[in-house]
Image (cartoon, rainbow, N blue to C red):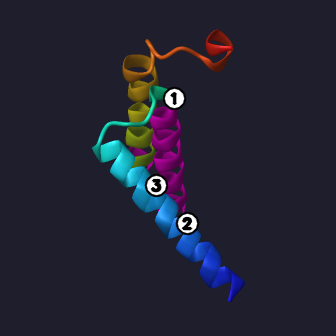
Amino acid sequence: MENLNKNKELVLFLRNLADSMENNTITSEQSQKVGEFFMSFKMSQEQDKDCEPMDVIKFITMGWYIYSNLLKDTPTVEEID
């Protein structure tokens, strides 16, 4: 029963997060964390499958592109503090 309550809490959190993203009411830092979680989750799903070397290269390249182009103007944690 406790596991069911945890699942409901997680579902509610994810729905609220999706709503916040659609309404553009989350900070750039929160958006970055969501993106990092998304990439980590997708990579863990891909690890369960047999990955082609080219797929791994594409995934790493996508991460590099996001880091170098989309996040380069985002302040680091040290800069925020």
Residue 31 against residue 20 in the figure, above or below: above
Instruction: Name the residue rendered at 37%, 37% in the picture.
Output: 25
Look at the image and tell me whether residue 49 can be seen. no
Q: CA distance from mark 2 to mark 1?
A: 21 Å
Q: Position of residue 6 (x, y in %)?
A: 63, 74
Q: Which mark is residue 10?
A: 2
Q: Nearer the viewer, residue 6 or 67?
A: 6
In the rendered structure, does residue 29 fall within the stretch colored magenta? no
In the rendered structure, does residue 33 fall within the stretch colored magenta? yes
Q: Tell me where the magenta segment starts and ends, as one range.
A: 30-54
Q: Position of residue 78 (x, y in %)?
A: 68, 14
Instruction: Name the residue rendered at 54%, 49% in the picture.
Output: 40
Q: Secondary structure at mark 3?
A: helix
Q: Position of residue 70 (x, y in %)?
A: 37, 22
**For marks 2 and 1 on the same chain, the one whose residue lies earlier in the sequence:** 2
Depth-wise, is mark 2 or mark 3 nearer the camera? 2
Q: CA distance from mark 2 to mark 3?
A: 18 Å
Q: Are marks 2 and 3 in contact (CB under 8 Å)?
A: no
Amino acid type at circle 1 is Glu
Amino acid type at circle 3 is Lys
The residue carrying mark 1 is: 29
Instruction: Name the residue rendered at 43%, 36% in the picture.
Output: 26
Q: Is residue 78 left or right of residue 24?
A: right
The residue carrying mark 3 is: 42
Q: Quadrant of residue 47?
A: bottom right
**For marks 2 and 3 on the same chain, the one whose residue lies earlier in the sequence:** 2
Look at the image and tell me whether residue 35 can be seen. yes
Marks counted in the figure total 3
* Main SS of residues in magenta: helix
| Crowding at mark 2 (Cα within 10 Å: few <14, some 14-19, many 20+) | few
